[in-house]
Image (cartoon, helix red, strand yellow):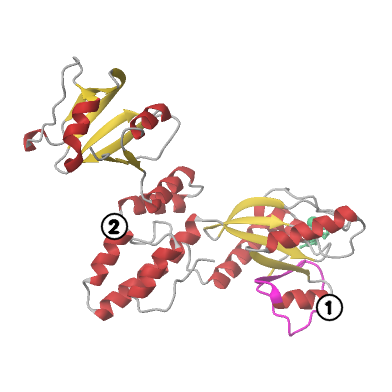
Amino acid sequence: MARPRLVLLTPRGVAGVAVVAIAATDRTGFLAQVLRRPDGSAWSVSATSADAAVPRLALLQLDGVAVDQVVVVERADRTELCLHGAPAVLDALADRCELVGPSPAADRVERLLRSARSDAQLALALEQRGAETLAELCARLRRLGAPARRREARAALARSRVAQALAEPCRLVLFGAQNAGKSTLLNRLAFAPRALVGDLPGLTRDPVVEPIELCGYPYLATDTAGEGDAAGELDRAAIERGRAERRGGLAVLVVDGTRSPTLAEREWWQHADLRVRTKADLPGAGWPADLVPDAVVGCAGEGSAVAVRAALGAALRRQRGLPPAPPDGVGGAVAWDADGCAELAALADEPGPAAAS
Ligand SMILES: Nc1nc2c(ncn2[C@@H]2O[C@H](COP(=O)(O)OP(=O)(O)O)[C@@H](O)[C@H]2O)c(=O)[nH]1
Ligand SMILES: [Mg+2]
C-alpha cells in the first residue's frame, strides 16, 4: 500500500498540540489501522455530510499500543487529527506515512507570528495568515487581461518588498575612521549604552550587534572597529573582522563632521551604501560642498536619540526605496523569496525579481 500523505498544519514544537490532516482519498485504510474508538472498538470513517466537522474522541494506536488520545474532525475533503504534539508522537506517525510540513511561505508567516517584535510585524503575520496564497494570486492574475495582470503583479511585487523588509531585519554595518563617532551613533540607535565610547583609538574591537527598529522597519545594527593605524595584531584582526561584517550588509559610513574628510574617507564615500555626517552639534570647519551626506546627526547626550533615529531611519527608507512602514499589513498576498518574486515579475512582464535589500 502506498504511504499516505499526512500534512502537518501547525508548526512543529516541543509540546502543545499538533494538527495533521489526511486527504479523503488516502484515509480509509490508514485511519482504520491507527485509530480506535475510546472503548477500544474499531474506528470507521463517517463520511456522511451530517457528521462533517463534528469532533470525536479517539485513541491513536500504533502497533497495538494506545499512544495518544486524539480529537478527530472529519471534513468533506480530509480528516484532521488533533494530536498531543510531543515530537515522539509525530515521529511515530511519520514512520508510518509521509509527513509533510506547512509550505515554506506558511512556515515563514508562523515564525513571524511567534517572533514578532513590533505591532507592525504582528499585523503583517496575521494578515498573511488569512490572505490568498501566492499560488492562488498568480493563478488569478493569469486569468486577467494583460494590463490588469501587469498592474496587479507590479502591486504584488511592491507589497512583497515591503513585507520582506518588515519581516526580515536588514543588517546595517557602521564603519569609518577611529573616533568618528560610530559607537556613539550605535548607542543612540539602540537607546542604550551598548558600545563603549571614548577618545581612545581602537576602543571597539568585537562587533557589537543590536536589533533595532527605525521608522517601523527592523534592522540589525553592527558597530565595528574603526579603520586606522593598527597598534598590534589584535587591532589588525578587529579591523579585518569589521570589513568582513560589511559583506552582505548595508555599509553605513560614519564621518566626523567637525573636520574635513580625509583621503581615505573620500575613498570610502564612493563605496558606502549610506553616508552619515555626525557630531553636527559641534562647530564644524572645512566640510566640502561636494560631499552631500544622506543624513546629518548630532549624537551628544541621550536626549538626541529620537532625532538621530528619525534622521537615519528616513535616510535608510529613501536608500531602500521603501514607503512609510504600514501598521496594518500590506494589503494582499506576497512573495517571500526570490522564486516568488521572479514569478510575479514574469506576470508583470518585467525582466527580473526585485530582491529585497
Ligand atoms: N559632541 C559630540 N560628540 C560625539 C559625537 N559622536 C561621538 N562623539 C565623541 O567622539 C568620541 C569618539 O566617539 P566614539 O563613538 O567612541 O567613536 P568610534 O571610535 O567611531 O566608535 C567620543 O568622545 C564621543 O563622546 C557627537 O555626535 N557629538
Ligand atoms: Mg567605537
Residue located at (34% from left, 40% from top): 99
Which residue is under mark 2? 132
Q: Mark 2 is on which residue type?
A: Glu
Is the CB of the residue bearing disc 2 within 8 angstroms of ligand 1? no
**Mark 2: secondary structure:** loop
Q: Position of residue 282 (x, y in %)?
A: 80, 67
Identify whether 232 is placed above or below 44: below
Q: Quadrant of residue 50?
A: top left
Q: Mark 1 is on which residue type?
A: Leu
Which residue is under mark 1? 263
Residue located at (46% from left, 50% from top): 119
Q: Position of residue 348 (x, y in %)?
A: 35, 76
Q: Could you tell me if residue 208 is visible in this image?
A: yes
Q: Position of residue 258 (x, y in %)?
A: 82, 71
Q: Could you tell me if residue 299 is visible in this image?
A: no
Q: Quadrant of residue 169?
A: bottom right
Identify the magenta region.
Answer: 271-295
Secondary structure, magenta segment, majority class: loop
Identify whether 255 is placed above or below 59: below
Residue located at (34% from left, 62% from top): 331
Tell whether 190 sits left or right of 282: left
Tell whether 284 sits left or right of 249: right
